[in-house]
Image (cartoon, rainbow, N blue to C red):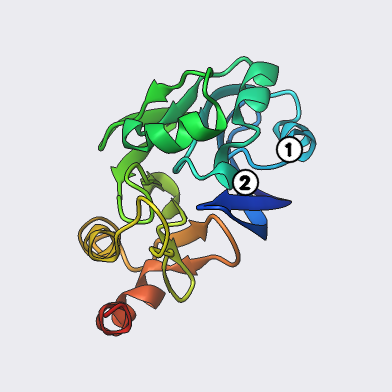
Amino acid sequence: MNIQRVVTSGKFELDGGSWDVDNNVWVVGTDDEAVIIDAAHDPAPILDAVAGRTVTAVVCTHAHNDHINVAPEVAAAVGAPIWLHPADNVLWRAVHPTVDYRPLVHDQRIPVGDTEIRVLHTPGHAPGCCCLYLPAEDVVFTGDTLFSGGPGATGRSYSHFPTIIESIRTRLLTLPAATVVHTGHGDSTTIGGEAPHLTEWIKRGH
């Protein structure tokens, strides 16, 4: 199984604010097929990374604009469906009012090669946040739910700090400690590296 990181740059916009961001786009697959996670900002390097493989899905970990802004363009180019948890529909429609997607659900399995990605619904940063767990590779793609150093931001609309902590506690920190955490921004980490800091995060959030 190949896991490629493509870094794209652009703007995150919400609640009237705008911030420069670098996003991690993940391409997961074999020599023949792939799944794209979080098609952000610039379609060209994402399509270059796919390199002619069959793309079976464009999966969105959540619907903040910086994770979905080129999802329709990329999906159209590769002929694949877009998947998103419907709890993020209001955020999706703010960016793509006329583009439809398929609904992700908790514990859904997305085939890739001879294995599958398991969907974990992890609300908090946004209502529809999902993490994508690849047990065969001991890897989880966490979007903006969990970073190296702590949980994703919860200070903007549709976010909730106690909810993200509960999601991390019950659905991420229960994964094996050696599981590599590939994030939506910045460096990767591990479940074991983050787990000891749960109490610290809770205190920091109050």
Residue 125 in the figure: left or right of residue 202: right
Q: Is residue 130 above or below residue 116?
A: below
The tag earlier along the polypeptide, 2 or 1, is 2
Coordinates of residue 35 in the picture (x, y in percent): 55, 32
Q: Are marks 2 and 1 in contact (CB under 8 Å)?
A: yes
The residue shown at (25%, 57%) is 167
Residue 192 in the figure: left or right of residue 181: left
The residue shown at (35%, 34%) is 85
Task: Tell me the kind of residue under disc 1.
Answer: Ala
Q: Which residue is mark 2?
A: 25
Q: Quadrant of residue 73?
A: top right
Coordinates of residue 15 in the picture (x, y in percent): 50, 53
Q: Which residue is mark 1?
A: 49
Along the viewing direction, whichever of 170 and 117 lies nearer the viewer = 170
In the rendered view of the protein, which quadrant contains the N terminus?
Answer: top right
The residue shown at (26%, 80%) is 206
Q: Label 2's element?
A: strand
Residue 180 in view here: yes
